[in-house]
Image (cartoon, rainbow, N blue to C red):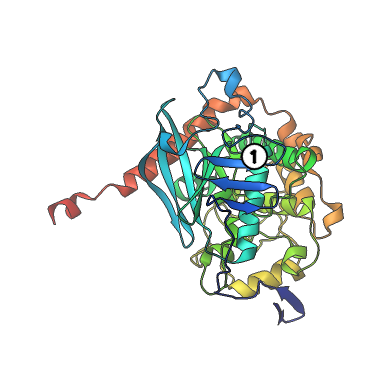
């Protein structure tokens, strides 16, 4: 649904509250093309049986970690609910045979056909991925009208959670995170041939070992069926590249724009719009900003992204020239002129990052942020007395 704002045509999904029906096999399995999923698990024609595992997550074998690959539904014991949305929940579960803590994402399938298509696309993508910087998939089931996807549980939350807890992430630590994210995007683009479509801080998950992994392959941004009913879609569209907002074609380079915007937000401790002049950036929240951390209204923000120059760092800002150059190669209005993920890995800002040395600092930062969030959730003394 294109909307005209000033001189910009902004393309939005058509609001439609109607869920479309879906077909089941005689045995009660959900089938879409070569993919079939039921209580026993996921099958993709030519790949294997219901219990055929996804690839063992890269790095797990080296670390000697027990992997719950091909986990069965009965193996999972629910601990608690760690996330909730309009179309489902995320549970923290224990995999009994290995003792591993995992995340179980439950998504209702009584939704629009386009939403189901994207959920199935995520399943296909997760099943084929074998990269240490992408959240590993372990199993999937269909039961009682919903699909459950079993993934690694990332105990540090997301980069969005980290910045909300501690503010701006120091550049040295941010480079350590960035190298992992770029490596993950490079794998998705060059090897898996997948466009993520929803790169943003809340989809970059971290753990207390200092690792960051890419999650949610464009599904979370598709779960909304109207702009007014779902804030998650609004949160997604603000990280979109200018060509996506304008309804034009998009490709791997659209993920690169979203990456640059996400990293700049983590460095500043606030969303980078409205942008400051190069050399005049301040770290931390603006005096007057909206609930989403941006002082611009939603429509004005989209206009600004499409029409105005992208954010730029400059001499006098509290960042290195290497970081400024990295961001500049991501935030280019013309998609074809943006750097590819493989080129970003060779950038001066992250090429020299020693991942082993950074792990300790990253682990300490994520743990501190998690501890601060846990402390905030504790009832105050005054509340206890009441």
In the image, taking residue 23 as reference, residue 306 lies left or right, namely right
| Quadrant the C terminus occupies | bottom left
Q: What residue is shown at x 55% (from left), y 65% (from top)? A: 111
View extreme (left): residue: 385
* Residue 166 visible in this rendered orientation of the protein: yes
In the image, taking residue 305 as reference, residue 136 lies left or right, namely left
**Is residue 211 placed above or below 270 in the rendered structure?**
above
- Camera-nearest residue between 176 and 144: 144
Which residue is denoted by mark 1 in the rendering?
A: 127
User: Which image quadrant is residue 236 in?
Assistant: bottom right
User: Which image quadrant is residue 369 in?
Assistant: top left
**Is residue 326 placed above or below 357 in the rendered structure?**
below
**Is residue 201 placed above or below 271 in the rendered structure?**
above
Q: What residue is shown at x 41% (from left), y 27% (from top)? A: 99
- Camera-nearest residue between 386 and 215: 215
- Camera-nearest residue between 36 and 332: 36
| Quadrant the N terminus occupies | bottom right
């Amino acid at each position: 649904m294109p909307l005209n704002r000033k001189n910009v045509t902004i393309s939005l999904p058509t609001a439609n509250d109607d869920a479309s029906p879906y077909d089941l096999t005689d045995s009660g399995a959900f089938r879409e093309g070569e993919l079939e999923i039921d209580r026993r698990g996921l099958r993709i024609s030519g790949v294997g049986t219901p219990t055929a595992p996804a690839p063992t997550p890269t790095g797990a074998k080296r670390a000697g970690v027990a992997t719950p690959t091909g986990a069965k539904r009965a193996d999972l014991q629910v601990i608690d609910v760690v996330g909730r949305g309009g179309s489902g929940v995320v549970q923290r579960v224990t995999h009994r045979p290995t003792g591993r803590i995992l995340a179980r994402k439950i998504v209702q399938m009584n939704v629009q056909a386009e939403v189901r298509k994207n959920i199935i696309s995520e399943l296909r993508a997760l099943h084929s991925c074998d990269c240490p910087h992408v959240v590993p998939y372990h199993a999937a089931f269909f039961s009682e009208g919903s699909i459950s996807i079993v993934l690694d549980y990332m105990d540090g939350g997301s980069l969005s959670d980290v910045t909300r807890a501690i503010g701006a992430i120091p550049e040295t630590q941010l480079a350590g995170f960035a190298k992992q994210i770029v490596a993950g995007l490079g794998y998705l683009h060059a090897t898996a041939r997948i466009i993520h479509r929803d790169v943003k801080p809340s989809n970059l998950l971290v753990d207390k070992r200092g690792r960051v992994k890419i999650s949610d392959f464009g599904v979370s941004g598709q779960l909304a069926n109207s702009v007014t009913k779902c804030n998650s879609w609004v949160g997604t569209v603000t990280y979109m590249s200018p060509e996506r907002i304008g309804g034009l074609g998009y490709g791997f380079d659209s993920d690169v724009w979203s990456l640059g915007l996400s990293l700049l937000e983590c460095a500043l401790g606030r969303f980078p719009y409205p942008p400051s002049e190069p050399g005049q950036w301040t770290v931390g929240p603006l005096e007057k900003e909206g609930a989403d951390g941006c002082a611009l209204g939603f429509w004005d923000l989209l206009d600004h992204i499409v029409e105005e120059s992208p954010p730029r760092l400059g001499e006098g800002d509290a960042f290195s020239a290497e970081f400024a150059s990295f961001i500049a190669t991501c935030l280019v209005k013309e998609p074809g002129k943006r750097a590819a993920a493989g080129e970003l890995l060779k950038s001066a800002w992250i090429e020299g990052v020693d991942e082993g040395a950074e792990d300790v600092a990253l682990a300490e930062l994520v743990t501190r942020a998690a501890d601060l969030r846990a402390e905030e959730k504790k009832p105050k003394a005054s509340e206890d007395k009441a």
